[in-house]
Amino acid sequence: MRATIVGAGIAGLTAALALARHGIDVEVFERAQVLKEAGAGLQLSPNATHALASLGLLPGLQKIGFEPQSAEVYRASDGVLLLANPLGATARARWGAPYLQVHRSDLQALLLAALKEYRRVSIHLGEEVAGALSDHKSAYVQMKSGRLVASDFALGCDGVRSVVREALFGKESLQFTGQVAWRGVVATDDLPRGLIPPKAVVWTGPERHFVHYYVSGGRAVNFVGVVEQDWHHEGWTTPGDPDQLQQEFSDWPDEVRHLCAAVRQPFRWALYGRPKMTQWTKGRISLLGDACHPMLPFLAQGAAMAIEDAVVLANRLKVLEDPTLALKAYFSARIERTAKVQAWSRRNARLFHLPGPAAGLAFSAARIADRMTGSDPLDRMEWLYGYEAL
Ligand SMILES: Cc1cc2nc3c(=O)[nH]c(=O)nc-3n(C[C@H](O)[C@H](O)[C@H](O)COP(=O)(O)OP(=O)(O)OC[C@H]3O[C@@H](n4cnc5c(N)ncnc54)[C@H](O)[C@@H]3O)c2cc1C
């Protein structure tokens, strides 16, 4: 069986590896001339590390990752702790896989190194895809150069502005959320010693919030600061003005101010909402990752969902040899879960930006409910982190 993959992001590379492990020949077409991930971190919750472990990547992940002790939410105005979920050994014991924080380029390098083991996987760089279609025999991917590549099936892993999605289902409708994410990575040595705790931390405030956590084994700190603002550019590599970033968070806690002051080049990303798709598969072509379920980054699950997609799809292809049936089965297995994650991400966008007293009330209601029902706060995450991609 031969597959064509459009896009060599996290979805495309993970899918290539998952398919290659099942003996499928894979050609990946990526429009970038060089594969280098924009400097940014990713939180990989146990559902994602479990799926990556099934591809043999756990030892490598443990080398590149940082395991936080806990995830904590604070109110920025007075430093009150609103929520604390233990991670570290607790997460490992509960879910059988670690919660890790990684640099995107480290994860990309790990996937590429694993793919080198498979001679029947080829990655073509500088190849922009212009469209895709399929008939009863083959899937066809059309290059911008005019070349047509035929295979048994094709996967659109080409991100939020997917041309494969557009070719299959027409123009998308998208809506600006009014929110802009500032992001950056700072070397730990450039920060006051001990300032950043070994935890995933969210600071909340009216109309903005700020997240920070270690990546690259603790040698760097990744941050994302979301502000409500009328600015509309969506892209990983759009630089932002460091002075403007400092002004946005000038009266926030020390950790936030030091990170904003230390970053050499922050980037900005306008956040768009997109409705749930009702179909991802047409004939011999399907979509994975942000191409079919782009989500706001407030549950840290976009890459995790792309990774799960890849493993589930490869397993369907193993069981159902007809790719049209396997692609349909993959869609049925994934649609409800990814839609729920999209909805929770939207809900967190509102929760994190509530004004002070309302934020306190929202989080304490959850704590009181846990105490009354005797439940562990991690029970609330069971559906998400306890999922095993099969
Ligand atoms: C601020 C922010 C923070 C985030 N934090 C987290 C987090 O902590 N945890 C998490 O799990 N997720 C997080 N995410 C989400 C995550 O980054 C994405 O969901 C994930 O990168 C999607 O991967 P993908 O491969 O589907 O798309 P992409 O990473 O966008 O990859 C698409 C690839 O396709 C290529 N391509 C596009 N068009 C074409 C074409 N026509 N021809 C050929 N190639 C093409 C692109 O060049 C690119 O390489 C975050 C997102 C943002 C914005």
Image: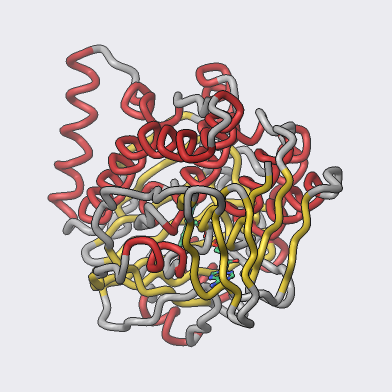
Q: Nearer the viewer, residue 131 or 53?
A: 131
In the depicted structure, whether residue 280 falls above or below residue 175: above
Q: Quadrant of the N terminus?
A: top right
Residue 322 or residue 374, whichever sits in front: 322
Q: Residue at x 51, y 77 (%)?
A: 267
On the rendered structure, is 260 left or right of 104? left
At 58% from the left and 20% from the top, the residue drawn is 96
- Of residues 139 and 165, the one drawn nearer to the viewer in this rendering: 139
Q: Residue furthest front?
A: 136
Place of residue 274 in the rendered image (x, y in percent of width and height, measured from the top left): 27, 61
In the image: residue 373, left or right of residue 239: left
x and y percent of residue 354 in the render? 18, 56
Decide if residue 130 is on the left or right side of residue 111: left
Q: Position of residue 289 (x, y in %)?
A: 47, 52
- Whether residue 288 is visible to the viewer of this picture, yes or no, is no
Q: Is residue 131 visible?
A: yes
Give the residue displayed 41% in from the left and 38% down from the top.
328
At horizontal 51% and vertical 50% (from top left) the residue drawn is 303
